[in-house]
Amino acid sequence: MSRERAGAFAPGRVNLIGEHTDYNQGLALPFAIAEGVTVHATASGDERILARALDCGEEDQFALADPQRTRGWRAFVRGVVSELRRAGYPLVGARLEIGGDLPRGAGLSSSAALEVALCLALLALIDVADVDRVGLARLCSRVESEWVGARTGLLDQLASLYGAPGTALRIDFQAFEIDPVPLRLESGWRLVTLDSGERHSSASSAYNERRAECCRACELLGAGSLREASWDAVERLPERLRRRARHVLGENARVIDTVAALRTGDLPAVGRLLNASHASLRDQYEVSTPAVEMTVERLLRAGAAGARIVGGGFGGSVLGLLAPGVRAPEGTREVHAGPGAHLLDHRTVC
Ligand code: GLA
């Protein structure tokens, strides 16, 4: 059975803490946000994909069986189609309308939201609704590495696929365990994001470089991943690699501490952990920029209990935790933990 129409929504994410830990088999604590990407798919009866990106008014067309390499948002569509077919799904030709309310390139994971929404909508069109979500996250990450050139981890896709209202996800990338952690912000505490306005053109090459440095550190340590490395061993690494590894080990510990602070409702402690995470990302992992630093400063000067860069770095958004009564600087958006990726209601036709 196939459908004439299907639709899917996939949210962006904010990573509360645990940055650059996913590809190091570490820990992270993201949550899905209410904003996301929506894909409406209509079966076209031919063997082609026609995709329209509503936010920029651009189109793309290609044969299902032969998506050629390209750049920008089109690379995600072609990559998803190609990887789904490679995984054995008998996709049908379709017209795709891509919309939503997630800003691109703002560090809120619009890429993963696009991949996930495309996957769910294209699969629903062939009546596949029940998919292994970890497998789907891996497929989307292959799209990023093989079609877009960013060797990212699974953080963004898992957050989008497993998010739930009012809930952060403690993800252990070694054991592959995803545990819900209630994200209770009572008595007027708020989480906000503030866009630094910076879109770093070489962000994916710098990201890949950080990842390669972690691999090199593991080789020198004889460890399968930085999760297995001890503080003592890390101190013997060459200077730059030592700083990268120190960030990863420290960040894993901060995830554990943040979960504990959330469980006891100690939000001032969460704020201090966010600040410590940012300092480590700036000084040890070196993924901040002057525009990001100014954005962090704006939030802290306004009275934020904590502020830090979110996502891969080199621009994008800053997350701030505001205590009751603190006035958010202009341009901030309040963020809430919302539902994970899901199908939208469409009638089954045949
Ligand atoms: C990007 C990547 C993720 C993760 C973060 C940093 O968002 O897509 O896999 O590595 O950077 O934590």
Image (cartoon, rainbow, N blue to C red):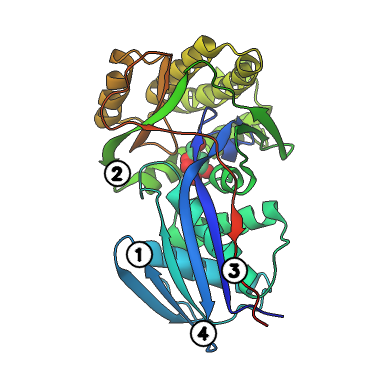
Is the residue indicated by label 2 positioned so its CB lies within 8 Å of ligand 1?
A: no
In the displayed structure, would residue 245 be above or below residue 124? above
The x and y percentages for residue 321 are 44, 20
**Mark 2 or mark 3, which is nearer the start of the sequence?**
2
- Residue 200, numbered label: 2
- Residue 54, numbered label: 1
Judge from the rendering whether residue 295 lies leftward or rightward of residue 20; answer left or right.
left
- Crowding at dot 4, Cα within 10 Å, few <14 / some 14-19 / many 20+, comes out as some
Q: What residue type is labelled 3?
A: His
Task: Give the Cα distance between marks 3 and 1.
Answer: 20 Å
Element at label 1? loop
Is the residue indicated by label 4 positioned so its CB lies within 8 Å of ligand 1?
A: no
Which residue is located at x 46 percent, y 72 percent? 96
Task: Give the Cα distance between marks 2 and 1.
Answer: 24 Å
User: Does the CB distance between marks 3 and 2 fall below 8 Å?
Assistant: no
The answer to whether residue 44 of the structure is visible from this angle is yes
Q: How many marks?
A: 4
